[in-house]
Image (spheres, rainbow, N blue to C red):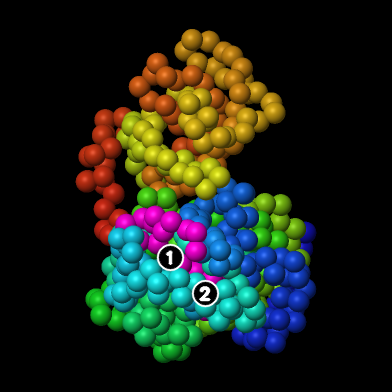
Amino acid sequence: MPSFDAMSVSNQVLGMNARNFLYLNRYNKGRAKFAADDKLTTKKLFIKNNIPTATIIQAFATRKGLKNYSWDLPKEGFAIKPARGYGGEGILVFKNWDGLSGTTISSRAYTLKQIKSHILDIFDGIYSLQSIPDKAYIEGRIVPHRFFKKFGSMGLPDIRIIVFNKIPIMAMLRIPTEESHGRANLHQGAIGVGIGLRTGITKYAILRNKYLKFIPGTKIKTSGIKIPNWEEIMLLATRAQIVSGLGFAGVDIVVEKKRGPIVLEINARPGLSIQNANLASLRERLERVEALNVPNAERGVEIARSIFAEKFSHKVKEERKILSVIEPVTIFFNGKSGEYKAKIDTGAYRSSIDKSIVEEFGFHLLPDNIHVSSASGGGVRPAIKLEFNLGGKKISTIASVADRSHLQFPIIIGRRDLKGFYVNPLLSHEQKSSRFVDQDDHYEYDLPEE
């Protein structure tokens, strides 16, 4: 493997022609690009590979399917999207629904007849990337983590990460505005805020290529904002790039209130304004990692945090989260999720889950059993691949399966899955929530002058 210092790099800003010739044409093959352009196909691919994304409620491909649908939709809202849309065009996000009509987040009222007419327009390809006939789908409304609500009520803030060769290259927070009509698109008037890859802390912000010191309408400085769940977000973006088959991708992630980070969509032709938001060259970073052999997503994130570290990153302490003995966990599998109370057990090496939950979700048992030891002696148990959210962090592990129906908690979390946490046995979850984890108090920093 060549050393980082030995690589020839260019400090030039990456332009569109160079992006297309050097990276898109070489690393994004036709089949992967076609699939990425179809957001419905991509979402199904993510669900199949246990990558968290918004729930698909219904998909429409024909007028007959549209005519026969019951329209029994969540009262708290949903989103209607074209499968092959671009730039946020054709997306309607509803904040309420009574079965016959609803109101969008921009306070526009729609009747059922108007919604059907909108979906027929989607069928005709009005919003599609190549203006060809399209499909439409309805997905569950995403409720953002309260951390992001302070940036404004218009639209859904997201995080765009450019991933290349299994390595996160550059990132920014995108904040919708009234000018962008609630869309997180910089060309339409959204705000782009560059994010340091090692720390997850913002430094610069742009609006229409003008730099901002404060988020408009607030007293929040655009620099010094620490994004929650940052390492998890980078890992999720990298996993999404690998699964998509794209070598060079823009991955859009939102942090959902209950589920944590989820993939919104993936873009085979990500824009280049992210360079302005970071005051850095994409081309220079891409050239530094192009020749590397990266075995997996975890190693890719390690490389990104090492070679793209900010100058001040050594002054930022890594934060560890405090857990009580009993914690809520959210399990994800095959597009479904469920919340359970789990016991944090540092005396157990491996996590364990009750067989009733395994049956409820339809988990597939691994071909090989695993050896476990407990106070009652050792033994062999079946196992599953398990993904869950604990304390705002997504964890992927191998868990043993047991009959825990006679026990108080259906899940125990072993020390193998507690990396990055502190456990306080004298602390209740309620105390921790009110005294130690006020996110708004922990995610803003004053950065040193350069």
Name the kind of residue labelled 2 in the image.
Leu
| Residue at image coords 77%, 73% | 26
**Could you say which quadrant of the image residue 269 lies in?**
bottom right
The quarter of the image holding the N terminus is bottom right
3D distance between C-alphas at marks 2 and 1: 16 Å
Amino acid type at mark 1: Ala
Residue 285 percent coordinates (x, y): 63, 73
Does 412 appear above or below 443? above
Count neighbours of disc 1 (C-alpha within 10 A) and say few if under 14, some if 14 to 19, many if 20 or more.
some
The residue at 59%/32% (across/down) is 384
| Type of secondary structure dominating the magenta stretch | loop
**Residue 380 on image: x %, y %:** 61, 17
Query: If the image is split into quadrants, where does the C terminus sit?
Result: bottom left
On screen, residue 284 versus residue 354, left or right, reads right
Query: Which residue is tagged 2?
Result: 120
Which segment did they paint magenta?
67-87
Image quadrant assignment for residue 404: top left
Q: Using the rendered image of the protein, determine whether residue 137 is visible from the camera's viewpoint.
A: no
Mark sitting on residue 79: 1
- Depth order, front residue of 189/114: 114
Query: Quick one: which residue is furthest to the top in this view?
Result: 376
Number of other residues with Cα within 10 Å of mark 2, as a class: few under 14, some 14 to 19, many 20 or more: many
- Residue 426 lies left or right of residue 193; in this view the side is left
